[in-house]
Amino acid sequence: MRKYLYLILTLSIISCTTKPELSDRSGIYSGLFEKGNFADSIVIELEQDSIQWKAYFTSLEQNANRIPFRELEVKEDSINFKLQSDFYTYSFKNKWANNNSELQGSLTVDTMKIPYTFYKVRGKIQSPTSEEVSFETNDLKLNGTIYHPSIDTKKAMIIVTSSGNSDRSASRAEAQLFAKRGTTTFIYDKRGTGISEGNWSQASIEELVSDDINAIKWFSQKTNIPISHIGIKGSSQGASKIPYILNELKELKYGIAVSCPGSTLLESDLNYWKNRNKEKLGEDIEAATNLERMVFETIAGEISKETLQKEIVANKSQEWFDTVWVPNLDEIEIDKKLKYTPLPYFEKIKQPVLIVQGSLDEIIPTDSYEIISEALEKAQNKKYEIIVLKGASHSMYDVGQSDFPYWSKLHPQYLTTLENWVQNLSDSN
């Protein structure tokens, strides 16, 4: 009888220890999502407090960092959630398996359903320490995040924001990547974006660059990292500010300009409009482009609204007219940033500069990197490098044929290009 009692007690203990507990189900699950020639390393973080579950999506190759899932549903051994983009809904259906060590599920988007298995990460993923900060510039309070590496190498990078209402979120994944590699990295919401004060649309390039310079000086003082150990990086309009900032702070160590226009911002915007409409317009592309140019010139303050209005009336009967973007003239706000070009500043800088352009960039003029190279030659800059990534878009995403066209991925050589260049620069000094 005692033997049977002992056996029953033992089985009960085994049963209790192997029965999944809710507390065991939270954690970090990681794995490879694959469909044909598409593969992406995914991290899903599951958190549970006394009230509810929370789940987050991370993919470095998609430049996605802890994107919150929505519509979470937990029932018995299942957990389901969704992601929403501008075009698609991504439905994840999952089950905990193997004593909560695996998350087995499928992703459904459009007409596709792809199975996957993600594995629980033992311990914690080594992540850089983040610090939320704020600083004053031009009577405004701007907010940002500093990512500290585990080992202080006294190397730092500051990533400046791009055009429109872009804030620091667009650079968060890259900032964490460089921090993991030992570089203290600072990102911040420019004026009027995120939770920073001010108005970006009414600011001039000079005012935005002034904010960037103040951010660099403040960061240097706070971290005790000399400006001579700090590099700066920007993309698109942010890239166009890089040579300007390097000229103002000549002690900066280097600059990285990604998808930088070799023209005015106006020409870059016009080039994007032209590329998006050239197939539709055919032989009418030149006439339509001329009118669209006048629209941008009006916004830039180069021609009057009355002059534009006359051209609109003269061309309203043309078949191509509806293709041209014409805002409400009464609501146009002058934006002199459109007249800004980085070329005069490239012609002066001496610091090391990396220029990265995608071969399939539809926004900036195709020959931008060649024009920038000529400007750097005028500066007699011996420390620059130009890299054109075949198949990369303006945002550095891979535009090649994909068996899973519902997710955009960063070009496979993009991040390694930046990493290797910065590392080689450090090794040579």
Image (tube, grey):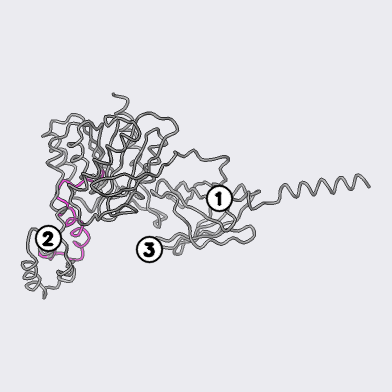
Q: Which residue is mark 3?
A: 87
Taking the spot 29% from the left edge, 53% from the top edge, the residue there is 197
Is 315 or 163 nearer to us in this picture? 163
The residue lying at 20 percent from left, 66 percent from top is 280
The dot on residue 418 is: none
Residue 237 position in % (x across, y down):
23, 49
Q: Badge 2 local density, few (<14 within 10 Å), some, or many (20+)?
A: some
For label 2, the residue is 293
Question: Residue 303, how many percent across, how many down?
Answer: 7, 61
Furthest-right residue in view?
1
Mark 3: give few (<14), some (14-19) or many (20+) Cα within 10 Å: few
Q: What residue span does the magenta drawing correspond to?
A: 258-287
The majority secondary structure of the magenta stretch comes to: helix
**322 sits left or right of 95 in the view:** left
Is 267 located above or below residue 258 in the figure?
below
**Residue ID at (40%, 55%):** 407
Task: Give the residue type at disc 2.
Answer: Arg
Q: Amino acid at mark 1?
A: Thr
